[in-house]
Image: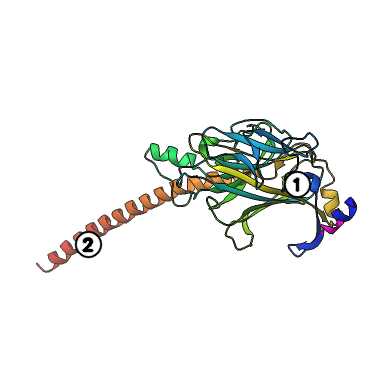
Amino acid sequence: MATMAFTMSGRSFAEDGHHEMEEFLKREHSLSKPYQGVGSSSSSHWELMGDAMVTTDQVRLTSDMQSKQGAVWSRIPCHLRDWELQVHFKIHGQGKKNLNGDGLAIWYTKERMQKGPVFGNQDLFTGLGVFVDTYPNEEKHLEAQKTRYTTRTQRIFPFVLAMVGNGSISYDHERDGRPTELGGCNAMVRNLKHDTFIFIRYVRRRLTIMIDIDGQHEWRDCLDIPGVRLPQGYYFGASAITGDLSDNHDVISLKLYQLTVLRSETEEKEEEEEITLPSVDNMDLLRMGENEEGWSNIAMFFIILFSMLGCFLLIVVGLIVYSHWNENRRKRFY
């Protein structure tokens, strides 16, 4: 019966029109209503931590109160090569825009059940973190210094971003994770009446994140990064934290699907090497692009400045030349 249920939950589809895939719901790695035994039974596949609690409608990671942190973690390590996680969540509270916080995170990490400052989980984690950040820490810090973002670098919060850690990379809370992010997108997810979802797919060492937050049942691209290397045997989890500002952070379901992907012999050889430590190919290029974005604004300032100075000098030289020409012209008439 268990095998039949597993098979019945599968379906086939194509990825990018090139690779045929089948997906199967992995119930032992999924969390959904009625949350039987979660937080109260050692036989449950999921464990609560901190201020997290189970209700009939959701797993509430934090309530809309200050200085709370909570999490829910899978007890079973995931040994899937290719997978897809669909997260149904809800963030809501009494706070007005930018007077709420701090957000929630979805994890696939080596460590589990560790409290800490990164959305309720430990810093220096090993694995993947996907963050729904609802408070602009860096923007508020810049405002206090009476400086501003440029229109090119300013973000609209809430913001979804991803980070891969190897156990020695720290998440920069004051800068909202910018130095180590792989990419992201804005996502207006607070206090919505309709359902909100995050889709995380890891296939052929490619990380894809999409969101469905508009109530249209349509996925919207958020980031797509090749060359992401994640070991097998890590744990899935979700966590959230509040500080001076707060929100209700709820997880309604976490559904993990095993993806079976047809690979060519060349692809099989390329991926046969075992991954022991999380990493991202060309991460230096990603960071260089971020630095270039910052430098481009400075470069643009100097380009405009020198252009204005050049125009001014041309006008001055033109006036001098015209003055000499006009004086010589008058002399010819005498």
* Residue lying furthest front: 56
Q: What numbered label is drawn on residue 16?
A: none
Q: Which residue is mark 1?
A: 30
Task: Residue at 53% x, 32% y: name it.
Answer: 67
Front residue of this view, candidates 172 and 79:
79
Measure how far apart labels 1 and 2 are at the Cα level: 81 Å
What residue range appears in magenta? Answer: 6-10
Q: Mark yes or no: residue 22 visible.
A: yes
Q: Residues within 10 Å of mark 1 (few under 14, many from 20)?
A: some
Q: Is residue 55 left or right of residue 302?
A: right
Q: Check the picture and name the quadrant holding the C terminus.
A: bottom left
For the residue marked with disc 2, what is the amino acid? Tyr
- Decide whether residue 7 is among the magenta residues: yes
Element class at badge 1: loop
In the rendered structure, which amino acid carries the disc numbered 1? Ser
Q: Is residue 163 left or right of residue 294?
A: right
For disc 2, the marked residue is 322
Would residue 140 be found to the left or right of residue 13 on screen?
Answer: left
Q: Position of residue 96 (x, y in %)?
A: 45, 46
Q: Is residue 291 magenta?
A: no
Q: How is the image coloured?
A: rainbow
Query: Considering only vertical position in the picture, is 231 above or below 124?
Result: below
Find residue 255 and report its horizontal and vertical position in percent.
73, 50
Q: List x then y, in percent, for residue 284.
A: 63, 42
Total number of numbered labels?
Answer: 2
